[in-house]
Image: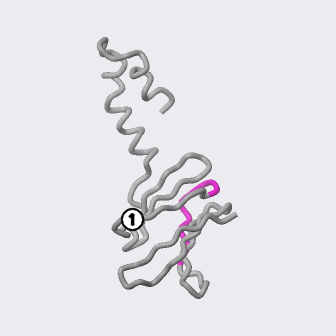
Amino acid sequence: MHLISWLVTPTIIPITVTGSSDATIKFWNRDGQLLTTLEEHKDRVMLVSFSPDGNSLASTSVDGAVKLWNLKDLKLTSELNVLLKKSCDWVRDYTNTNQKLEPRDRTLCDGI
């Protein structure tokens, strides 16, 4: 199964990007030729989406991983699960010890 997202570059060249069950993201030209493949996901890629300025791509997979890519060099720039873990590590003591927080807010980072 392939999920497809279109990107129109500044030069008005349509490029198709697919995320697939083999855990890859593939870039295709308008003639259907494979341009490149990104292989950082560990599970089926469910969705790809471009930033409004066309400089970044976000992708997510079945295992819940969300990755952000720089489209200029096709490098992985960040993983939201890593950023979320770092953020929770930073505020965990506060959420566990601040008596003024609502009970539901205390569990914000549970399991992360």
> Which residue is located at x 61 percent, y 84 percent?
32
Relative depth, front residue between 39 and 21: 21
- Side of 106 relative to 63 (left or right): left
Quarter of the image where one finds residue 22: bottom right
Which residue extends farthest bottom?
31
**Image colouring:** one colour
> Which residue is located at x 42 percent, y 38 percent?
85
Relative depth, front residue between 46 and 34: 46
**Residue numbers of the magenta segment:** 36-44
Report crowding for label 1: few under 14, some 14 to 19, many 20 or more residues within 10 A (C-alpha).
Answer: some
Where is residue 6? Give x, y as percent. Answer: 51, 72
Query: Which element is circle 1 on?
Result: strand
Magenta portion: prevailing SS class: loop
Relative depth, front residue between 32 and 73: 32
Residue labelled with disc 1: 56
Which residue type does callout 1 highlight?
Answer: Ser
Residue 18 magenta-highlighted: no
Position of 101 relative to 35 (above/below): above
Where is residue 44? Give x, y as percent. Answer: 64, 56
Quarter of the image where one finds residue 83: top left
Residue 39 magenta-highlighted: yes
Where is residue 91? Give x, y as percent. Answer: 32, 29
